[in-house]
Amino acid sequence: MIGTLRSMVLDCRDPHELAAFYAELLGGEVAAEDDTWVVVTDPAGRRLACQYSPQHEPPQFPDPAGSQQMHLDIRVDDPDVAERQVLELGATRVTDAVGENNFRVFRDPAGHPFCLVWGIG
C-alpha cells in the first residue's frame, strides 16, 4: 500500500452550502478551515471536503459527449423517503438516467451527481 484515502473533494462555488447539504444527507460534523475549504466528517470518520472553485461548472449528466467524472452512491433503506428528504435539502432529480433498478440519480446543489441505492450489497 502506498497511502490511505484522506478525503473525497468536490469543487463548488459555495463550499459552506454544499457541506451543509452533505452533512444533512450523511450526518456528521462540518468544519470550515476558511471560506475556500469546508469538510464534512461523517460518524464513521470519512471526510468529504468542499473546495471553492470560482470556475466550477456542474457536469452535464447524462451527456453522450462526456461523462460525470465521478459520483457518490448513498445507501438508503427506503428510496421514496430518502428521495423526498434529499429534494427538501436542495437536490434535483435526474429524470433521464438509464436503467434505474436499485438506484435513483440526483444532483447536489452544486450539480455533482449522486445516487441513492438500495437492495444491493
Image (cartoon, rainbow, N blue to C red):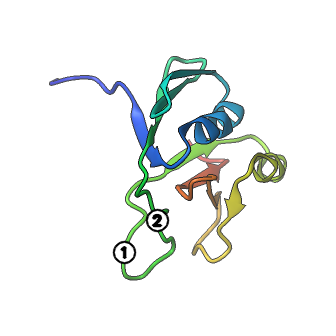
Q: What element carries label 1?
A: loop
Circle 2 — which element?
loop
Instruction: Tell which residue pokes out farthest to the left in this image.
Output: 2
Point 65% across, 68% down: residue: 94
Q: Where is residue 119 in the image (x, y as percent from the top left)?
A: 66, 47
Residue 9: name its quadrant. Answer: top left
| 50 is higher (above) or lower (below) than 113 | above
Residue bearing the label numbered 2:
59
User: Which kind of residue does numbered mark 1 sit on?
Assistant: Gly
Residue 40 coordinates in the image, percent (x, y): 55, 27
Label annotation for residue 66? 1
The furthest residue to the bottom: 64
Residue 38: percent from the left, percent from the top?
A: 51, 29
Horizontal placement of 53 versus 112: left or right?
Answer: left
Q: Which residue is nearer to you in this view: 55 or 65?
A: 55
For image coordinates 63% across by 53% down, the residue present is 109
**27 is higher (above) or lower (below) than 96:** above
User: Where residue 41 appears, x then y in whole percent?
Assistant: 54, 22
Residue at 47% in and 52% down: 71
Residue 48 image label: none
Three-letter code for the amino acid on which mark 2 is drawn:
Pro
Numbered disc in front, either 1 or 2: 2
Q: In which quarter of the image is residue 4?
A: top left
- Label 2 crowd (10 A; few <14 / some 14-19 / many >=20): some
Quadrant holding the N terminus: top left
* Tag 1 near tag 2, CB within 8 Å: yes
Residue at 73% x, 51% y is: 90
Camera-nearest residue between 121 and 19 = 19
Q: Quadrant of the C terminus?
A: top right
C-alpha span from label 1 to label 2: 9 Å
